[in-house]
Image (cartoon, rainbow, N blue to C red):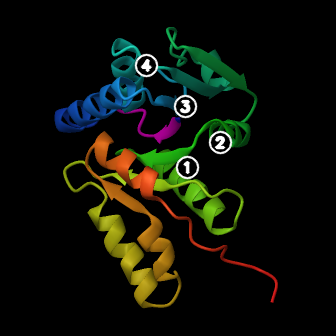
């Protein structure tokens, strides 16, 4: 099994760094591979380094322009270089059995929402989760609940978005996951 990890290229606070390292180490010790953006910086680098130190498989997918900027992690199990950010996300989705977002910024949100939306549209039936470190995702979850309350988001979709605090909880969620029916189907 492999989990796609979306997270920041900035380090964030020490508590987030510690949580990311613990999470990645726990996945590696459970024999779960990590697919991520391929960088050596920020929480991305923290995740990769911790998983590698625990003997885990870490597959990086990075566009050439970021390799040119010297952001590629030099010690990965497998580094796949693609041409565009679109190709990066498609390759990560193909390689992963589930998706999880750790704290991050706009890129993390973009990757999270695309993976979650692809599931709603029936492009995959893989679980999408949030690792909620220090309540990081709670404001966004409040907004998503508002979307449900106002009729923009089906409550089943929000219920299917996992919110966990540990790697063990993520693995339990993935094992029990039942994908909701497609959002759009022929009448």
Q: Secondary structure at mark 3?
A: loop
Whether residue 21 is in magenta: the answer is: no
Dot 3 and dot 2 residues touching (CB under 8 Å):
no
Dot 2 and dot 4 residues touching (CB under 8 Å):
no
Q: Nearer the viewer, mark 2 or mark 4?
A: 4
Q: Is residue 162 above or below residue 20?
A: below
Residue at horizontal 76 percent and vertical 29 percent from the top: 83
51 relative position to 89: left or right: left
**Which residue lies under the disc numbered 3?**
37
Q: Secondary structure at mark 4?
A: loop
Among numbered discs 1 and 2, the one appearing first in the sequence: 2
Judge the density around disc 4: few (<14), some (14-19), many (≥20) Cα neighbours within 10 Å. Answer: many
**Which residue lies under the disc numbered 4?**
56
Among numbered discs 3 and 1, the one appearing first in the sequence: 3
Front residue (pair 117, 54): 54
Q: Which residues are magenta?
A: 2-11
């Amino acid at each position: 099994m492999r989990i796609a990890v979306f997270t920041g290229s900035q380090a964030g606070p020490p508590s987030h760094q510690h949580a990311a390292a613990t999470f990645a180490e726990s996945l590696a010790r459970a024999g779960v591979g990590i697919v991520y953006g391929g960088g050596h910086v920020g929480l991305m680098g923290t995740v990769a380094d911790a998983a590698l130190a625990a003997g885990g498989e870490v597959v990086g997918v990075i566009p050439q322009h970021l390799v040119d900027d010297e952001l590629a992690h030099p010690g990965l199990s497998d580094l796949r270089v693609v041409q565009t950010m679109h190709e990066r996300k498609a390759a990560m989705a193909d390689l992963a059995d589930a998706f999880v977002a750790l704290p991050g910024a706009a890129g993390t949100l973009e990757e999270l929402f695309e993976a979650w939306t692809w599931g709603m549209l029936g492009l995959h039936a893989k679980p999408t989760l949030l690792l909620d470190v220090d309540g990081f995702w709670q404001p966004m979850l409040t907004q998503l609940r508002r979307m449900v309350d106002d009729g923009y988001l089906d409550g089943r979709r929000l219920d299917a978005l996992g919110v966990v605090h540990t790697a063990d909880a993520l693995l339990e969620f993935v094992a029990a996951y039942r994908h909701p029916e497609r959002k759009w189907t022929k009448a």
